[in-house]
């Protein structure tokens, strides 16, 4: 793939009913296809030198706000090209999953970027269309083993 390579993480948090935790994006970032108001699973760009697991733990604190320890499992990665990025950036997104009791989630530290939304069945996450991040259908396939 051509262009500048950036890496990020995506985190599927499941409850005991098998539903995924979603957030609502508060800011638009057109160069990565993100619009204010759209739904997403927690996602974050990795900082220089950061390992995927480290970025995912940071994501748990900043965008989810999880109390206590949770086990993280890296289940794959995929490449995405941002919609309108002028420099031809390509993102490699590492996909993680965990199971978390809803009472462990206390809310994001940074309410300017994201807000909690709630829980949704995985099949419905893949069907969000324009209401969700464009990467979601492909990331759902990774979670489902496809």
Image (tube, helix red, strand yellow):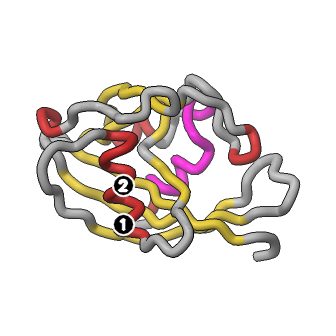
Tags 1 and 2 touching, CB below 8 Å = yes
For this rendering, which residue is in front, 16 or 102? 102
Residue 60 falls inside the magenta stretch: no
- Which residue occupies 18% across, 62% down? 71
Instruction: State the mark number for residue 135.
Output: none
Classify the position of the N terminus by image quarter.
bottom right
For this rendering, which residue is in front, 60 or 47? 47
The span from disc 1 to disc 2 (Cα, nearest Å) is 6 Å
Please name the residue that numbered disc 1 is placed on: 54
Q: Number of callouts in the render? A: 2
Q: What element carries label 1?
A: helix
Q: Residues within 10 Å of mark 2 (few under 14, many from 20)?
A: some
Q: Is mark 2 on a helix, strand or loop?
A: helix
Residue 41 image-quadrant placement = top left
Image x and y of residue 39, in percent: 50, 31
Residue 132 falls inside the magenta stretch: yes
Classified by dominant secondary structure, the portion drawn in magenta counts as helix
Image x and y of residue 42, in percent: 42, 45
- Which residue occupies 32% across, 49% down? 60
Which segment did they paint magenta?
129-140
Image x and y of residue 73, in percent: 28, 67
Residue 143 image-quadrant placement = bottom left
Please name the residue that numbered disc 2 is placed on: 58
For this rendering, which residue is in front, 45 or 84? 45
Task: Give the answer, above or below, for where 30 lies relative to 87.
Answer: above
Q: Is residue 92 left or right of residue 14?
A: right
Q: How crowded is mark 1: few (under 14 residues within 10 Å), some or many (20 or more)?
A: some
- Which residue occupies 36% across, 28% down? 116
For this rendering, which residue is in front, 114 or 34? 114
């Amino acid at each position: 793939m051509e262009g500048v390579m950036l890496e990020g993480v995506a985190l599927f948090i499941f409850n005991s009913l098998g539903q995924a935790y979603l957030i609502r994006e508060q800011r638009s970032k057109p160069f990565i296809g993100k619009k204010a108001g759209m739904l997403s699973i927690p996602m974050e760009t990795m900082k220089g030198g950061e390992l995927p697991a480290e970025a995912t733990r940071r994501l748990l604190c900043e965008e989810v706000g999880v109390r206590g320890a949770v086990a993280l499992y890296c289940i794959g990665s995929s490449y995405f090209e941002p919609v309108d990025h002028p420099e031809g950036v390509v993102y490699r997104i590492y996909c993680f999953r965990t199971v978390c009791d809803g009472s462990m989630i206390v809310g994001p530290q940074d309410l300017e970027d994201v807000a909690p939304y709630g829980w949704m069945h995985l099949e419905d996450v893949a069907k969000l269309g324009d209401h969700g991040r464009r990467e979601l259908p492909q990331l759902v396939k990774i979670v489902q083993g496809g």
